[in-house]
C-alpha cells in the first residue's frame, strides 16, 4: 500500500509494481488520511503488519531567519506524521498478531546540522518516539526501529536549497565517498520489516557511508 500527496507519481509507481501494489492519497499530517490508508490496507490485503514511515520534507535557513510557519511545516510532516502513523497501526497490527514499524530518521537525528533546525529537530524526535514505541508496543508483538541515512540520491537531496550540480562531490570526505542509491536503504528497511530482524527493536540503524565515523584521508 503506497501513500503520498503526489497522486500521479504514486499511481504510476503502483502500476509499475503491478497487482501486488495499491495507491491511496495520503497526507501524513492528517489523522483522517491515516484512518483511510489503514482501512484501505486491511481491506485490500486482509491484514496490516508493516509500516514504513518514510514521508519527509526539508526547509533550510539559519535559525534566526526561520519562520514559525516554515518550522512547523517540517514538524507536521516529519514528526507529527510519524507519530500519527505509529498510533494508527497499533490496533491493526494487534489484529494481525504483531508487526514491525520502521521510522525513517536521518543522520540529522544523531548530530546537529546547521541551517536545518526544523529538519534536525524532527529527526531527533523520531529517535525518541521510536524508543518509546518500542517499549510500549513490544508486549504486543510490535517491533519499532529507526533508520538514519546519510546522503541518498533522491529528488529531495538534489533539490535542497544548498544542493550543487555535483551531487557525488558533496560526499567525498566520507569513507565511502559517494551518495547512496535509494535501493541500498530499501534493503535495510526490508530487513527491519521482515522476520530476519526478529530480535531488533528500539534500535537505530545508520547507513551513512561512514560519515559519522570521521573524515576520511585526502584522496589523491
Image: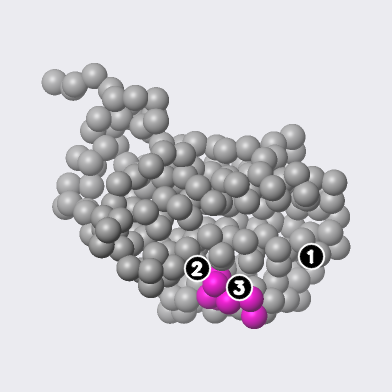
Above/below status of 198 relative to 37: above
Residue closest to the eye, 138 or 98: 138
**Sequence-wise, which precedes: disc 1 or disc 2?**
2
Above/below status of 117 relative to 212: below
Question: Rounded to the nearest whole Å, what is the CA distance between mark 1 and mark 2?
Answer: 23 Å
Say if mark 3 contacts mark 1, CB within 8 Å: no
Say if mark 2 contacts mark 3, CB within 8 Å: no
Question: Is 31 a magenta residue?
Answer: yes
Query: In which quadrant of the rendered view does residue 65 lie?
Result: bottom left
Image quadrant containing the N terminus: bottom right
In the image, the segment drawn in magenta is 26-32
**Residue at image x 44%, y 68%?**
72
> Left of 20 or right of it: where is 218?
left
> Left of 138 or right of it: where is 208?
left
**Residue at image x 79%, y 45%?**
138
Residue 92 numbered tag: 1
Of labels 2 and 3, the one closer to you: 2
Say if mark 1 contacts mark 2, CB within 8 Å: no
Q: Which residue is mark 2?
A: 76
Question: Rounded to the nearest whole Å, what is the CA distance between mark 3 and mark 1?
Answer: 18 Å
Q: Which residue is mark 3?
A: 22
Of labels 1 and 2, the one closer to you: 2
Picture coordinates of residue 149 (x, y %)? 44, 43
Residue closest to the eye, 102 or 49: 102
Query: Can I make out residue 177 in this image?
Result: yes
Amino acid at each position: 500500500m503506497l501513500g503520498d500527496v503526489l497522486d500521479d507519481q504514486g499511481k504510476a509507481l503502483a502500476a509499475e509494481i503491478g497487482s501486488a501494489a495499491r495507491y491511496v492519497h495520503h497526507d501524513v499530517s492528517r489523522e483522517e488520511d491515516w484512518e483511510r490508508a489503514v482501512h484501505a490496507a486491511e481491506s485490500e490485503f486482509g491484514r496490516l503488519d508493516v509500516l514504513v514511515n518514510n514521508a519527509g520534507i526539508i526547509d533550510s535557513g539559519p535559525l534566526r531567519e526561520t519562520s514559525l510557519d516554515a518550522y512547523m511545516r517540517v514538524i507536521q510532516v516529519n514528526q507529527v506524521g510519524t507519530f500519527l502513523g505509529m498510533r494508527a497501526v497499533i490496533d491493526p497490527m494487534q489484529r494481525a498478531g504483531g508487526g514491525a514499524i520502521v521510522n525513517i530518521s536521518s543522520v540529522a537525528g544523531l548530530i546537529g546540522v546547521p541551517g536545518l533546525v526544523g529538519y534536525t529537530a524532527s529527526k531527533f524526535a523520531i529517535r525518541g518516539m521510536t524508543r518509546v514505541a518500542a517499549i510500549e508496543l513490544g508486549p504486543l508483538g510490535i517491533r519499532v526501529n529507526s533508520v538514519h541515512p546519510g546522503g541518498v540520491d533522491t529528488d529531495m537531496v538534489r533539490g535542497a536549497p544548498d544542493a550543487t550540480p555535483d551531487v557525488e562531490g558533496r560526499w567525498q570526505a566520507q569513507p565511502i565517498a559517494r551518495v547512496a542509491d535509494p535501493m541500498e536503504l530499501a534493503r535495510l528497511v526490508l530487513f527491519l520489516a521482515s522476520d530476519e530482524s526478529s530480535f531488533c527493536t528500539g534500535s537505530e540503524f545508520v547507513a551513512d557511508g561512514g560519515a559519522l565515523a570521521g573524515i576520511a584521508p585526502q584522496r589523491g
